[in-house]
Amino acid sequence: MLADVIASGAVPVVRLTEVFRQAAASQIIVSAHRINQGHMPDLGKPDEDSDFYFVQADAPETAVPLIIELVKSRIPKRFGLDSSARFPSSSTWKR
């Protein structure tokens, strides 16, 4: 598990604690702070102007097409972005 690798000290770890380019009220930032404090982020249905979304998938075979659809179509459409532009996304998987 990632927590075990971090706790082992075998790899360098950097913890980001300062917000640089996102609004402090961004749900991405709020969720990240909650996670860093050991709390679950709000995984409920996001507000219309939210920038944080949780999509549950029960298997990688289900998750991969969902993530591709989000990154290629839904997120660019929602935020008026060029669908060929590159932007960061992240996903986690817990077995």
Image (tube, helix red, strand yellow):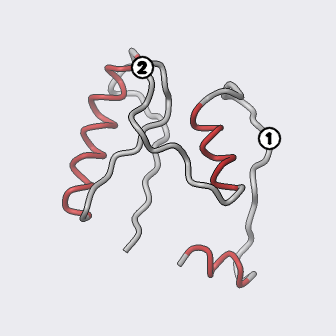
Disc 2 from disc 1: Cα separation? 26 Å
Q: Residue at x 62, y 81 (%)?
A: 4
Q: Position of residue 9 (x, y in %)?
A: 75, 81
Q: Amino acid at mark 2?
A: Glu
- Tag nearer the camera, 2 or 1: 2
Q: Position of residue 44 (x, y in %)?
A: 42, 40
Q: Please tell me whether residue 12 is drawn above or below residue 14 in the rendered image.
A: below
Residue behind mark 1: 18
Q: Amino acid at mark 1?
A: Glu
In the displayed image of the protein, which residue is found farthest to the right? Answer: 18
Which label number is shown at residue 4?
Answer: none
- From the image, which quarter does the C terminus lie in? bottom left
Q: Please tell me whether residue 64 is drawn above or below residue 52 in the rendered image.
A: below
Dots 2, 1 in contact, CB < 8 A: no
Left or right of 94 in this view: 34: right
Q: Earlier in the sequence, mark 2 or mark 1?
A: 1
Q: Residue at x 68, y 75 (%)?
A: 6
Q: Position of residue 51 (x, y in %)?
A: 50, 29
Q: Residue at x 45, y 24 (%)?
A: 47
Left or right of 26 in this view: 73: left
Q: Residue at x 65, y 38 (%)?
A: 29
Q: Position of residue 19 (x, y in %)?
A: 75, 36
Within 10 Å of the Cα at label 2, are there few (<14), some (14-19), or many (20+) other Cα atoms?
few
Callout 2: helix, strand or loop? loop
Name the foreground residue: 38 vs 20: 38
Q: Please tell me whether residue 3 is drawn above or below residue 14 in the rendered image.
A: below
Tell me which corner region of the image, top left, top right, bottom left or bottom right, holds residue 94: bottom left
Numbered label tally: 2
Which label number is shown at residue 48?
Answer: 2
In the displayed image of the protein, which residue is found farthest to the top? Answer: 80
